Image: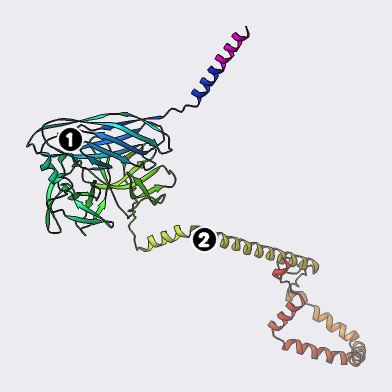
Amino acid sequence: MKKAFKQIGVAILTLCLTVSCFSFVALAAEGTLQFSDPSAAAGENVTVTAKVISNAEGVAVGDTDITVTYDPSILKFVSGTNATGGDGTVKLSAKGDGTSMEVNYSMEFTALKEGTATLEAKEYTAYLANDEALNLTLGTSQVTIQGGTPVSEEEAGENEGQAGSDGLKVTVDGKEYTVNANFSEAVIPKGFTAAETELDGQKTKAMVQETSGQYIFYLQDSDGNSDYFLYSDDDGSFSQTAVVDVNSSLSIFLMEHKDKEGLPEEYKETTTDIGGKVFTAWQNTSEKEYYLVYALSSEGSKGYYQYDTTEKTYQRYTPPVVEKKESSNTLTDKLTNFINKYMTIILCAVWGVFLVMLIIIIVLGVKLSRRNQELDDLYDEYDIDGDGQDDMPKSRKRDRDQFVGFQDDSDEYEDDYGDDYDDDFEEYDEDFDDEYADDDDSYDDEFEEYEEETPSVRSRKKKDDDDYSVDFIDL
């Protein structure tokens, strides 16, 4: 019985350990290795392209190393991009840029004879940018050779590693390249055709875009890898490019470009790594996942393309057009511009003037009201009529007729009392003269002095006595 329990316990423990082990096993991310299936004639060069694509959402491809085999009796390796090899084996090796979800390779071969050659991956190691292992589904390439003139491996070997009939050398960014004039039709990108041209006085072969007149040379480095370089007729210089297939019918060729040319302010100049090559770009500061790059399209037009780092897509971008209003020097336009520019200051000035005028009107109204009040008080104090006329009755001019008969009565009265009256009057007059003589002299002097004063002087003295003005400080 105890033995049975021990066996059950061991089984349960084994099961738990097994489950635990399974729980620590990490599944590798999935990806694919894809090849193109080109065709050519015997004696020509043919290019096979390959690319590794990551299916891990949001994680870019990292480092890859792939070994590809081919039939050396049909194909002879010439050169490649991220590819080296020969004698039936090609080594594909590349480092991801940390942003791209795919890595591209190209292999150029010389077709020796008619037939079908199969390229397939025998072994590989692949990782994502976060160092996670990438499990690839491996594809194959079928290269079909039909027609043409067969060549021996020795004859093909004479051209291997040779870039042109004369091995023309050029220097790009301090690095020496050889012009590869033995490229096949398969390497000619969309919108270009092969063309004979001259470089430094020597005849060679390049690719030209008829619509724009732009030349592309196929240059080979010291490791035997060939790549596309744009050529400038203005100064005879070369610049790197990267070929991007936007869709099945359109490709763009990235270019170095320094002029901002009317881009909005939110785009700031920076650099971006595309396919292991660094190009000038402009990042949208408000939406940082978007970049602008300058490129030549396969249709021959140059312009900006917006690169979406999230979806890894390119879309043509047209800078917004800012309409410039024609300047005018008319007085009306100048006045209108001045008012628009200094509208706030003008409104403040107008309101300031209005407030000052309002204060002045209020002050004058208050002063006038107080002055009128004081005048009214003065009139009441002196019992003066408001219309400027006093209340004393004017003496009426008597008619001369009322004095008729008065003379006769006077004569009769004089006859009766004349003598007595005259004596009494004379006596009274003498006393009056003695008593008031001095006062009369003083009064005459004051009156004469008063008469000598002008009306303006008398008015000013009166004003000094009764000053009804109101000072501003009184308010």
> Disc 1 marks which residue?
72
State whether residue 207 is above or below residue 333: above
Nearest to the observer: residue 110 or residue 471? 110
Segment colored magenta: 1-12
- Please give the label number shown on residue 345: 2
Nearest to the observer: residue 221 or residue 68? 68
What residue do we see at 77% from left, 66% from top? Answer: 377
Left or right of 7 in this view: 144: left
> Is residue 245 in view from this perspective?
no
Left or right of 336 in this view: 261: left
- Please give the label number shown on residue 166: none
Q: Point out the image quarter for the C terminus.
A: bottom right
Residue 239, position as x, y percentages in the image: 26, 53
Left or right of 291 in this view: 217: left
Q: Point out the image quarter for the N terminus.
A: top right
Q: Specify the amino acid type for callout 1.
A: Pro
Mark 1 or 2, nearer chain start: 1
